[in-house]
Image (cartoon, grey):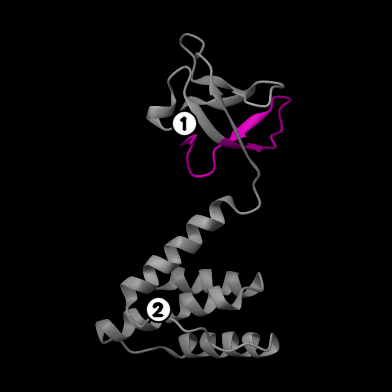
Amino acid sequence: MGYLMALADLALKLNQPEVTALHVARVQAVRMEKGWKVPPEDQEAEQRVRQALAEQVSTWPDLPQDSKELEARCRQIWKEGQTRGLTFCTGMVKEAPEQRQYTYIQPDGGGEEVFVLARDLLHECQTKGCRVRYALEKTLTVRRTARLGARCRLAA
């Protein structure tokens, strides 16, 4: 439960009290389902969330009581957070140089090829000519490097 409360604290620091409320509610639901005592820290966390919501002239969100439903909502937020703020591009995977663990992506809009490590591509995306969706990541090298978020995705 500690990691969920850590995520709740982080969301509160990022001024996302609704996300914090979701994580706190999940912790409370699991504890209730397991018959565990709710520690004072969890109660204090809920009060901090309620205070943050009140400062935004908002109330505690309407959340499910079931821990599985709460888990699904938490997972959705985590998934969305992986790519928040990234601009995605599409391109075509080029043939990997022999005996190398990298390849390049030719952007659909033209321009310079994008360097990508083979391990960052899903297995089904490692084939020459595969169309992929990716985001660029700043690196310390001169190369343009593809950031594939959690995974490279096949382009639609």
Taking the view exactly as shown, the residue that stands out farthest to the top is: 98
Q: Which residue appears at 26% of the width and 87% of the height?
A: 35
Secondary structure of residue under mark 1? loop
26 lies left or right of 144: left
Q: Is residue 24 above or below residue 10?
A: below
Instruction: Write down the quadrant of residue 92 in the picture.
Output: top right
Taking the view exactly as shown, the residue that stands out farthest to the left is: 34
Q: Is residue 22 above or below residue 52?
A: above
* Start-end of magenta stretch: 134-156
Q: Amino acid at mark 1?
A: Leu
Where is residue 60 drawn, in percent x and y?
53, 87
What residue did someone put label 2 on? 27
Where is residue 2 drawn, in percent x and y?
44, 72
Tag shown at residue 121: 1
Where is residue 143 drawn, in percent x and y?
69, 24
Q: Main secondary structure of the magenta part?
A: loop
Give yes or no for residue 124 being in the magenta stretch: no
Taking depth in this image into account, of 34 and 150 the one nearest to the observer is 150
Give yes or no for residue 136 being in the magenta stretch: yes
